[in-house]
Amino acid sequence: MSPADRTPLLTVRGLSKSFGDTRVLADADLDVARGEVLAVIGASGSGKTTLLRCLNGLEVADAGTVAVDDARVDFTTRPAPKALHALRDRSAMVFQQFQLFPHKTVLENVAEGPVVVQRRDKDEVRAEARALLERVGLADKADAYPHQLSGGQQQRVGIVRALALRPELLLFDEPTSALDPELVGEVLLLMRDLAREGWTMVVVTHELQFAREVASRVAFVDGGRVLESGPPAQVLGSPEHERTRQFIRRLSHPL
Amino acid sequence: MGSVDWGLALDSIGPLVGGAITGTIPLAAVSFVAGLVIAVAVALARLSDNRLLSGLARAYVSVIRGTPLLVQLFVIFYGLPSVGLTIDPWPSAIIAFSLNVGGYAAEIVRAAILSVPKGQWEAAYMIGMDRRTALRRIVLPQAARVSVPPLSNTFISLVKDTSLASVVLVTELFREAQQIAAFSQEFMLVYIEAAAVYWVICLALSAVQGRLETRLDRYVAR
Ligand SMILES: Nc1ncnc2c1ncn2[C@@H]1O[C@H](COP(=O)(O)OP(=O)(O)OP(=O)(O)O)[C@@H](O)[C@H]1O
Ligand SMILES: [Mg+2]
């Protein structure tokens, strides 16, 4: 599919957010088309997490607009809970620290949203959840509690929990950075499969290899805005800005 | 000191245990359940963004914790009639104990809710829950686990505190003991026997607490 065929799914304009005196997002713009995988990179503290959290209303921006599909929220005036809810309905997030519900089994974690919030048929949801777990190789863990799983398994459950919500947009905040190095691969491979299946994904990551090989576009965030974005080869290979170049060099050669 | 009057010791066990079964235990159980309901409400009020609500909750906890339970009991049973509100012994005792447990347990419940990581709220919001559903299905169940040990302590204290109900004429374990002791003049024997009955009840409660914790621990790494 060429970019021209792609309809926009996520549109962010002029997004700003301050915590006290610290301006964390400063006029950030972002576009993601349906089926696109956007890798968001940038230094620690540059505002990546805050940007992602604003996309599904976990954080309320001070100004700007976020539109996912037909849900559009203008943050110039404080948005109504209903508007944020509409935004949240269309996306699902995978957290850095997994945030599975420790008092619920794996299956219950996955089914909770669809059954309790979306009020879908319980048996149907459970069947679908089992199929999703099977897909990610965790069929035998359906009745286990999260603490009985490895980090990589927990994060795969986190991803399945997000998928079960049937979102339009998947948001990932450094999904592998809390994992032991040998467990990173299993999660990245699953994400690559999702990308190939056509899921629209925004992935905040420090995994340059993932950005290079899986993302359709890379956005470099600096000082609370998207400094540049484009195809991986361009942004990672011959970036326009010196700041981007420096960041990529530091990430590739930490010593 | 004379020798132990075993006949009296044996004869008084029946009334003492009876007082526990018909007085102490139901008084503690009913007050604890009502107190827990008050506690959850007060804890939520204390955590709410509404200044007035949280201020009222804070004041309530402060008054309850800052005044003796015996005085609270006297205000309700002996004080209220002078403003035209007369309440029978049993309801008086239950009201006083419930309000008291409510004040102490509110702080336990509040701390337990705060101990649930912020990320759990966020995950609940992420899957589309509103605040109320997140609280009910995600946060309170986790807070419950944390609050079992301190709440058990509150309950065990309450069981012993119900002996104060004797001063507002509720017939429970300790009032039985007082009556038997006054009649027989065997103060030492009868009061030690009463103490033993309280102790056995508390031992049983500690055992229940242990089992409850094990049950709730099934989802916690050990
Ligand atoms: N709730 C908050 N209150 C105050 N400051 C915050 C809050 N959340 C984030 N910040 C600040 O905003 C800035 C950007 O944070 P953010 O988490 O978005 O950065 P990030 O790019 O995700 O960084 P990292 O790579 O370390 O995760 C940081 O300076 C952070 O300290
Ligand atoms: Mg971050």
Image (cartoon, rainbow, N blue to C red):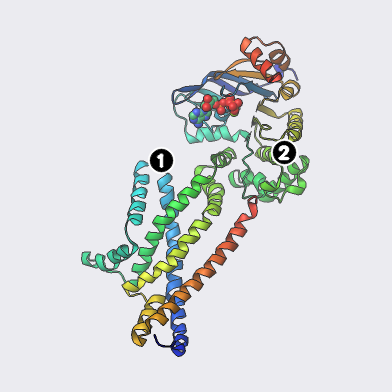
Q: Position of residue A134 (x, y in %)?
A: 77, 43
Q: Secondary structure at mark 2?
A: helix
- Left or right: B136, with B72 as reference point: right
What kind of residue is marked 2? Gly
Quarter of the image containing the C terminus of chain A? top right
- Left or right: A114, with A135 as reference point: left
From what the image shows, is residue A225 above or below residue A114? above
Quadrant in which residue A254 is drawn: top right
Q: Position of residue B191 (x, y in %)?
A: 40, 78
CA neighbours of label 1 inside 10 A, class few (<14), some (14 to 19), many (20+): few
A56 or A83: nearer the viewer: A56
Chain to which the residue tagged by mark 2 belongs: A
B51 or A169: nearer the viewer: B51
Is the CB of mark 1 within 8 Å of ligand 1?
A: no
Q: Quadrant of ligand 1?
A: top right
Residue in view at x 45 percent, y 60 percent = B154
Q: Position of residue A149 (x, y in %)?
A: 71, 45
For label 1, the residue is B49
From what the image shows, is residue B152 above or below residue A4? below
Q: Residue furthest left?
A: B82
What kind of residue is marked 1? Asp
Q: Secondary structure at mark 1?
A: loop
For label 2, the residue is A152
Residue in view at x 47 percent, y 88 percent = B6
Residue B5 disc label: none
Residue in view at x 50 percent, y 35 percent = A82
CA neighbours of label 2 inside 10 A, class few (<14), some (14 to 19), many (20+): many
